[in-house]
Amino acid sequence: MTVAVPPAGGGGLPGRSSGSGLADVIDTILDKGLVIDAYVRVSLVGIEILTIDVRVVVASVDTYLRFAEAVNRLDLASQQQGLPDLLSSAPQKIAHGKSKGVAQGVLEAAGEKLQDLMASYAEEPAPRTRRRQREED
Amino acid sequence: MTGSTRQSGAGDRAEAPPRNTACYVYGILPEDVEISEDAVGVGDPPGRVKIIRHGEIAALVSDVDVDRPLGRAQDLVAHEQLLDEAAAEVPVLPLRFGAVMTTPEAVVEELLAPHHDSFAAALKQIEGRAQFVLKARYAEQPVLVEVLTENAEARQLRDRIRQLPEEVTRNERIRLGELITQIIAAKREADTRAVVERFEPVTVGAVVRDPSHERDAAHVAFLVENDRQADFERAVGELRSEWGDRVEVRLLGPMAPYDFVTT
C-alpha cells in the first residue's frame, strides 16, 4: 500500500564521484577561488586553527617520530631481509595493531572531530542551478 | 525554511535588507542561469540563494546575518556544494569562502560592474569544462617497506632504534622520520610529475596542489572538458589499478574550477 518515495532529486544529481569529506572541502574553498579586495569579511570561527594544523602536518618533528614508530612496528616478514632474532618471536601482524594509522594527519583528525556537525547537513535538499533555455541546442 | 526573523520576502527585486544582514557571495555565473527555489546556502538558518544579474554576468548570493560567525562545517560544505552543483550545469567562477559584501547594490557596483568584462571572458573560457581533484596517497606499510629497501641509512637507523631502549634513541628516531619524509617527498615529486604528464592528453589544465598529508603521492587539480570526462575517469581507473595497493587514489569532482581562477 505505502510507497517509499525517494527524496526529491534522488538519483538525478550530477555525480560527485566519491564522497568528499570536510577535509577535502577545507582544502578547496579556504585556499582557492577568487578573492576580491572589495568585500568585507565577516568573522570566521574555527577555520584558522584548522588550516594552520594542515600546514604543520607536513614535516614536523611529530611527523618524524610517528614515521619512526611506524617503521619500528613494521612487520619484518614483509621486507625479505634476514633479521632472524627479531623475526622468530613476532610472526603475528604487529603492524596492524597499534601502528595502524600511526602516521595519519591532523587534517583527518580535524575532519573526524567535525563529523557530527556534518551529519545534519546531509539531509538538506539539493540546490540546483541550471541554464535558462539551453535545451534548444 | 526561510529565516522567520528576517524580512526578506520572496520577491527578488531590490529590497532594503535589515541592517544586520549582508550579502554572501558564492561565485560568478553567466546571466542566463536560474536557481531553484529551494536552494539554500550558508548561515543558520541557511539563507535562500538568489541571483544578482548585471550585463552578461550574475552573482550567486544569499543573505547572511553579520552578527553570527561563519565557518561551521555546514557553512563550508554549503558553500562548496552549491558551487559544485552549479558547476556541473553551468560555468562558474567560485569565490573563496567568506566573501561577504554589504548590500546587493555593492555586489553590482563593487564586484560585477568593475570586473564585468574579465569575468565574462573567464566564464567563456571555462564553458564546458569542470575541475577534478586527484588525491593519491601512499599506503603506509608498502611505502615504508620501499623506503627501507631502497635506503641503507634508514635500515641502519631502524636497526639501532630496535636494539636500544626508546629513551636513548630520540635523535635517531627523529633522523629516521626526517629521512623517510624526504624520501617520500622525492617519490611524491616523481609520481606527481608522472601523473600530470599521464593525464595531459585528456585534460586542458593541471595545477599541482600542496600536499595535505605526509604520505601524499600526488594532489593535483585538473580542468577537464565535459566531453572528455569519461576518458579522464577511465585514465584514473587505469592509474588506480596500476598502482594497486601501493597507493590509494581518490577522485573528487566535478567541481567548480577553484584552482584555475586567479585574481
Image (cartoon, coloured by chain):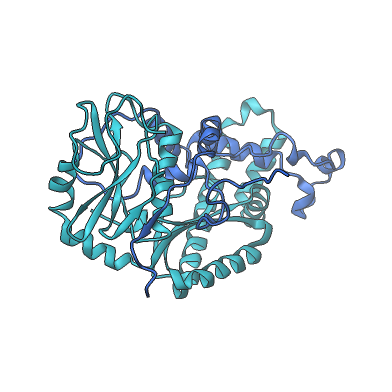
Residue B113 in picture, x, y percent from top left: 13, 53
Quarter of the image holding residue A41? Answer: top left
Question: In the figure, is residue B153 to the left or right of A44?
Answer: right
For chain A, what colour was chosen? blue
Of A94 and B73, the residue lying toward us: B73
Up the image or down, B137 lies above or below A23; here it is: below
Q: Would you place residue A84 above or below residue B249 in this image?
A: above
From this view, report whether residue B50 is shown above or below residue B4: below
Residue A17 point in image, percent of width and height = 55, 56
Residue A103 or B261: which is nearer the viewer?
B261
Residue toward you, B22 or A21: B22
Number of marks present in the image shown: 0
In x, y percent, where is residue B117? Answer: 16, 61
The residue under the point 50% across, 52% down is: B185
Residue drawn at point x = 74 percent, y = 40 percent: A96
Residue B101 x, y percent position in the rendering: 21, 38
The cyan-coloured chain is labelled B
Location of residue B151 by image quarter: bottom right
